[in-house]
Amino acid sequence: MDDNNTETETGTGIFINGRQQIIEMLQFMDESERRKLLKNIEMRNSVMARELSEQSLSFNDLARLSEESLNNIFSRTNPAIIGLALYNCKAELQRKVLTSLDREIAERAFEIMNKNLSAKKLECKRAQEKVLDIVIQLNRKQLISL
């Protein structure tokens, strides 16, 4: 094992990844606790803090972004992907995203959302991951702020 990895072997021979545990913990924390922990990590290791922030990002976190940031993200995304990504989301997030878009794009995404996609859960999850990849790229380019 290298020094940068926080894996340890338990008595049962199963490896526990400390980084993954932190990511999962961050995903369940409320926003203020999450920011506080990431700020503390950033003081010691800014690269790790950025990586943890990116890896713990969930699609539902987009609800706290500004309308301008959402427009910036979703204007770079195919409307079919937007519809798939929003399908399983709360109505509040769906509304916020759709109102941030140009009308034509929002209407095309809404058409996809209104289809019966219950058998396409994997595709919906992949669409959300695709959007999160765009979010991370834009954040790295400082075009949006998380």
Image: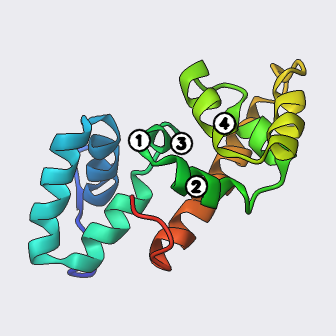
**How much space separates mark 3 and mark 2, taking CA atoms?**
7 Å
**144 to the left or right of 29:** right
Label 4 SS: helix
Q: Tag 2 or tag 3, which sits nearer the N-term?
A: 3
Residues at marks 1 and 4 touching, judged by CB atoms closer than 8 Å: no
**In the drawing, what numbered circle is on residue 64?**
1
**How much space separates mark 1 and mark 4, taking CA atoms?**
14 Å
Circle 3: residue type: Phe
Q: Point out the frontmost of discs 4 and 2.
A: 4
Q: Let me know if residue 98 appears in the view.
A: yes
In this rendering, the answer to whether 65 lies above or below 146 is: above
Q: Tag 3 or tag 1, which sits nearer the N-term?
A: 3
Identify the image quadrant of the N terminus. Answer: bottom left
Residue behind mark 3:
59
Label 4 Cα neighbours within 10 Å, binned few <14 / some 14-19 / many ≥20: some
Residue behind mark 4:
99
Q: Let me know if residue 1 appears in the view.
A: no
Circle 4: residue type: Thr
Given residues 129 and 142, the one toward you in this image is 142
Identify the image quadrant of the C terminus. Answer: bottom left
**62 to the left or right of 75:** left
Q: Position of residue 85 (x, y in %)?
A: 71, 39
Given residues 100 and 46, the one toward you in this image is 100
Residues at marks 1 and 3 touching, judged by CB atoms closer than 8 Å: no
Q: Position of residue 121 (x, y in %)?
A: 75, 29
**99 to the left or right of 29:** right
Residue behind mark 2:
132
**How much space separates mark 3 and mark 4, taking CA atoms?**
17 Å
**How much space separates mark 4 and mark 2, taking CA atoms?**
19 Å
Circle 2: residue type: Leu
Q: Point out the frontmost of discs 3 and 4.
A: 4
